[in-house]
Image (cartoon, rainbow, N blue to C red):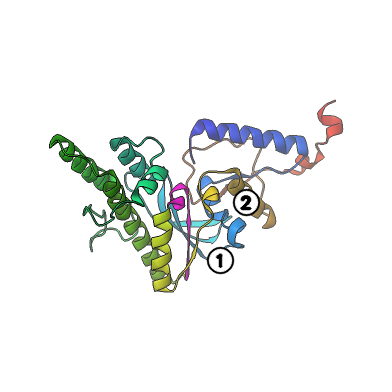
Amino acid sequence: PGLAGALLVGVSAAKAYAYALGKPLYGVNHLASHICVDQLEHGPLPEPTMALLVSGGHSSLLLSSDITSDVRPLGATIDDAAGEAFDKIARVLNLGFPGGPVIDRYAKEGDPSAIAFPRGLTGPRDPAYDFSFSGLKTSVARWIEAKRAAGEEVPVRDVSASFQEAVVDVLTRKAVRACRDEGVDHLMIGGGVAANSRLRALAQERCEAAGIRLRVPRPKLCTDNGAMVAALGAEMVARNRTPSSWDFSADSSLPVTDPHVPGNHDHDHVHEVGKENLYS
């Protein structure tokens, strides 16, 4: 899943490389790749793996017993994802785009308890693992507008810290709960928002208190990158998964339950391609 234009470029390039080199072709899932990339940082994934994915378009809790074939969603955002909320609040504060890094930076100099912003879907009757950040975004925006309407200066650092704390509080609370409920003793966090310093710190604190091992890749591997796609592709090869058909295309809404796009016909002919006949 992702932006169709970018996906089409990637799929076309992959097909060209596979054909030119005589190699099998694997269409893989962007979200599953965010989980698999942690193998480059901390070694093989435990099975099952509990993953919290937080990015501009996704906030999800996923349980995977096999990253190449079995990814089960436990919960997801029902409106704005965490990354979207960061971007929108940064825009209201006139901090530019993308919002995640700049809010993280300002929040380090602010008071996370200065303003009591709401925590969405944390009531006793709310879905245990789903996320909602639309109400939080609206609450923060109205608070800022009220300050400006009254002619008062907006405390950007305190707003950033308080908003960020509300987001990471919900994310980590639900992730630790999912680990406990499912009997999983570790948590992997991936996606662009996983680069957020406060999310990493609070997740570490709560995981240690609950006896859960935390796995978070270095920031460069959290944001979208080629290494994560290659990591999942390599795992497909290692586990002898069926290569994809040559006619597969980009799918901007591929569900996370499909870690890869399998083939439906014989691929032996792929290995017959060589430089001697490719350019003849």
Q: Name the spot of residue 23 as percent of width and height, x first.
A: 74, 42
Find the distance from the CA under tag 1 to the CA under tag 2: 15 Å
Q: Name the spot of residue 130 as percent of width and height, x first.
A: 33, 55
- Residue at label 2? 231
Q: Is residue 194 magenta?
A: yes
| Magenta range | 185-196
**Res 74 visible:** no
Residue in view at x 49 percent, y 43 percent = 254
Side of 190 relative to 28 (left or right): left
Q: Is residue 112 magenta?
A: no
Foreground residue, 163 or 11?
163
Image height of 204 relative to 134, above or below? below
Amino acid at pointer 2:
Ala
Query: Is tag 1's residue or tag 2's residue first in the polypeptide sequence?
Result: 1
Q: Are marks 1 and 2 in contact (CB under 8 Å)?
A: no
Q: Which quarter of the figure is the C terminus placed in?
A: top right
The secondary structure type at the circle numbered 2 is helix
